Image: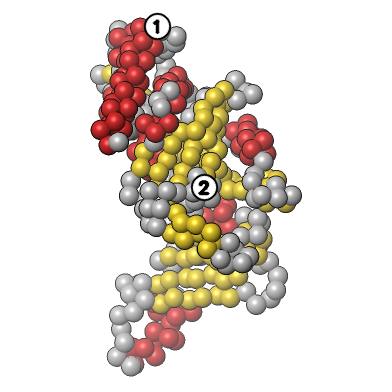
Amino acid sequence: MTTRNVTIKAYEFCTPKFGGDIQYEKVYDHELIDKLFESILKLDKPKRKYKNETVSINLGDFKQSYDANIVEGHFITARHGKRQTQIDIDTQEEIGKIEKHHGVENEVYFMIDRRTGLLLVQEDYNKVFTRKLLHTFLHSHKEIIYPYIEKYNDINKEAISKIHKRSCYRLMTLPPIDFLEKLKGFKKIKSATLTLDDATEKRNVDVSSILDKELEQNDTEDYDLEIKIKNKTGGSMVKVFEKYFSAIIEQQKYDSYSIEGELKNGKTKKISPETVTRDFYISVVFNSNGEPSIQDIFRGMEKIILRENLLLGKTSTPNSIMVGENSEVEEKIKKIIASKNQNKASEERKTS
């Protein structure tokens, strides 16, 4: 057994409401998203999936967590589309073939905070899961909850609070974390790169004035200048670079900049203001087969939701009446699910 750091990606669900001049964009009412996931899970497994030419995603599980404010589950991802040879890594001998329509299954665990819509997703070993892929997957099943939306709009018609079917939910990437905050996550800085484009008055930047003069004398006027600063001290240099970058960002001398180094989890990474995202790192035990402890993953996500929640203060829709348990809605959703499953069965009979 070994312990490794696992990356957790953070996203945000919103359930916007509209009515007259009133618009509630940044609100979250968990009932709609809960109903969508629960309904998708009732579809037959083959009917649940979304696939394109190279990847597929499916919902493997969705249920109440130990905490009443949290739901949890896992997605199933796979890559496909290319016939490949399987080999024994030790002997290098061929042991089988992965056909074009086959893939290696991977379970990607997630949690959703019912109060804020914060979605945490374990980094996908297959590198398949993305916000866009999940959005497409959910969109392909959205009609299942149209009866819920219709009932909600009917209940709330006097409050002029309406759900639009085409935008009943939004799934967004959280705003990037500040570059300097991300820099603090490094254990050691390897190098920094500063860039001046050809529109910059380079004589105003001390470090490039001599080079600019030399190039001009040799008939070179339009150029981008990239300055690389290497750490040759053997030390971490994190605090030194943090102080230096604080100054150059404030002075706005350079058109772009980046940092490359070793993160606290041991990974090497290069960051720039354009690539910084909201990631968390949790410690997870892996068994001898390379399988992670699911308990560790969910425990780590729960701590993020309870102690590092980036969306605290976000509210549900004001003066909104939820549908709750409604037999009429449930019956209509049940019929839609049965129809989808029946259509799938008919398709399979035609192709067999």
Q: Identify which residue is drawn at 27% across, 37% down.
A: 351
Q: Amino acid at mark 1?
A: Ser
Q: Nearer the viewer, residue 274 or 96?
A: 96
Q: Identify which residue is drawn at 43% across, 23% down.
A: 42
The chosen color scheme is secondary structure
Q: Amino acid at mark 2?
A: Asp
Q: Nearer the viewer, residue 93 or 202?
A: 93
Image quadrant containing the C terminus: top left
Q: Identify which residue is drawn at 43% across, 45% down.
A: 130
The span from disc 2 to disc 1 (Cα, nearest Å) is: 38 Å
Q: Going by the image, does 43 lie left or right of 9?
A: left
* Residue 302 image-quadrant placement: top right
| 319, above or below 80, in the image | above
Q: Secondary structure at mark 1?
A: helix
The answer, for residue 247, to whether it is visible in the render is: no
Q: Going by the image, does 239 lie left or right of 199?
A: right
As drawn, the residue found furthest toward the front would be 352
* Residue 258 x, y percent position in the rendering: 49, 65
| 39, above or below 173, in the image | above
Q: Nearer the viewer, residue 280 or 284?
A: 284
* Residue 138 x, y percent position in the rendering: 37, 33
As drawn, the residue found furthest toward the right would be 1
Q: Identify which residue is drawn at 51% across, 27% down.
A: 62
Residue under circle 2? 124
Label drawn at residue 284 = none
Q: Dots 2 and 1: beta carbons under 8 Å?
A: no
Q: Nearer the viewer, residue 76 or 195?
A: 76
Residue under circle 1? 327
